[in-house]
Amino acid sequence: MQQATKTLTISTSRIGLYEFTEAAFAFVKETKISTGLLTLFVQHTSASLLIQENADPEVQRDLERFFQRLVPHGDPLFRHTSEGPDDMPAHVRAALTATSLSIPIQSGRLALGTWQGIYLYEHRTAPHRRKVVLQVMGE
């Protein structure tokens, strides 16, 4: 059994989905692991990870419209606003999505479906530099 770990830094400019599928594929290829598992983990409480359609960008816009309706910025329900009106909504959005993902590796490639991509979902309105840890285990 082999292991390899890498940390990606993803720069965001605003709320939205940032695809990094190719970086994950490249990392798996570098490791030369044929069969195993890629685990991804975002080291933040106001961003998350998604596997989502990567063919039609309207899917991403629809997701954001849904989350804006579900968890609007500036909702008077939230008391934690020390970093602005988008702070607590960002934490709620991260709690409703995923901070880690696991993807099988088959024949040296990620076993993603035809239209699936890997995304960092930035939940804050300001730019950030987000860290995502990738770890591969297998043979």
Image: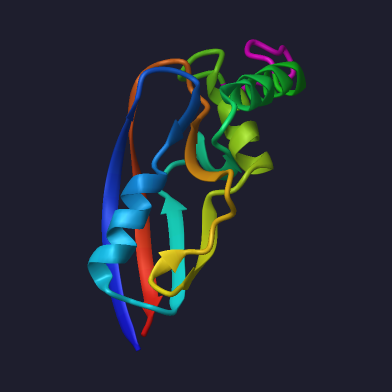
Most common secondary structure along the magenta stretch: loop
Residue at image position (45%, 77%) is 36
Quadrant, the C terminus: bottom left
The image shows residue 48, relative to residue 82, as above or below, that is: below
Quadrant, the N terminus: bottom left
Compare residues 132 and 81 and report the one nearer the observer: 132
Residue at image position (62%, 24%) is 89
The image shows residue 91, relative to residue 138, as above or below, that is: above
Give the percent coordinates (x, y) of residue 124: 48, 22
Give the percent coordinates (x, y) of residue 28: 33, 64
Asked if residue 74 is among those painted magenta in the image, a careful observer would answer: yes
Residue at image position (43%, 79%) is 35
Q: How many marks?
A: 0
Compare residues 134 and 105 and report the one nearer the observer: 105
Give the percent coordinates (x, y) of residue 112: 54, 56
Asked if residue 135 is among those painted magenta in the image, a careful observer would answer: no
Residue at image position (33%, 76%) is 33
Q: Quadrant of residue 72?
A: top right
Q: Does residue 7 appear left or right of residue 117 in this picture? A: left
Compare residues 85 and 96 and report the one nearer the observer: 96
Which range is magenta? 72-80
Outermost residue toward the bottom?
1
Q: Quadrant of residue 135?
A: bottom left
Give the percent coordinates (x, y) of residue 99: 53, 49
Q: Does residue 25 appear left or right of residue 106 in this picture? A: left
